[in-house]
Amino acid sequence: MAAESRENDRAAFWALVPVPARVAVMLAARLPHERAYDPLTSFTRAERHAIDLAVGTMIAHLAVAQQCMRDTAPVHTVLLH
């Protein structure tokens, strides 16, 4: 029962994610952008894994992009070869 409750909670939160964000995640996960409109329960375990990896990668890339847009000294140093 607890696992079912957690899944229902995850499905409810997924529905709250704005569609443009879900579209971006679908594209990053190399899934059709139309899947952004699908309920959480329609995704397979493999699709969820791909989406999870894509979200993590996007968060990392967006953090760098955000830092680039700030008018402050960089937090990190990048060595280019």
Image (cartoon, helix red, strand yellow):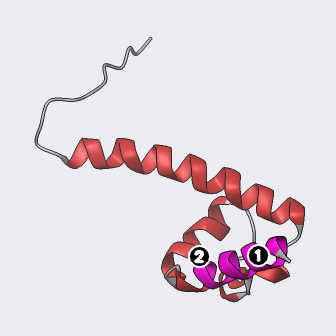
Residues shaded magenta: 2-14
To which quarter of the image does residue 6 belong? bottom right
Q: Nearer the viewer, mark 2 or mark 1?
A: 1
Task: Answer above or below: position of 44 versus 71.
Answer: below
Q: Report whether 80 appears left or right of 40.
A: left
Q: CA distance from mark 2 to mark 1?
A: 21 Å
User: What's the amino acid at mark 2?
Assistant: Val
Give the residue at x 69% y 56%.
Answer: 52
Q: Residues within 10 Å of mark 1 (few under 14, many from 20)?
A: some
Residue 29 percent location from the top left of the image: 70, 60
**How many numbered discs, if any?**
2
Q: Residues within 10 Å of mark 2 (few under 14, many from 20)?
A: some
Which element carries disc 1, helix, strand or loop?
Answer: helix
The quadrant in which the C terminus is found is top left
Task: Answer above or below: position of 58 versus 12.
Answer: above
From the image, give the main secondary structure of the stretch colored magenta. Answer: helix
Residue 47 percent location from the top left of the image: 82, 64
Which element carries disc 2, helix, strand or loop?
Answer: helix
Q: Report whether 52 appears left or right of 2.
A: left
Q: Nearer the viewer, residue 16 or 62?
A: 16
Which label belongs to residue 23? 2
The quadrant in which the N terminus is found is bottom right
**Contact? badges 2 and 1 (CB < 8 Å):** no
User: What's the amino acid at mark 1?
Assistant: Glu
Give the residue at x 30% y 49%.
Answer: 66
Q: Earlier in the sequence, mark 2 or mark 1?
A: 1
Residue position for label 1: 7
Task: Answer above or below: position of 48 versus 40.
Answer: above
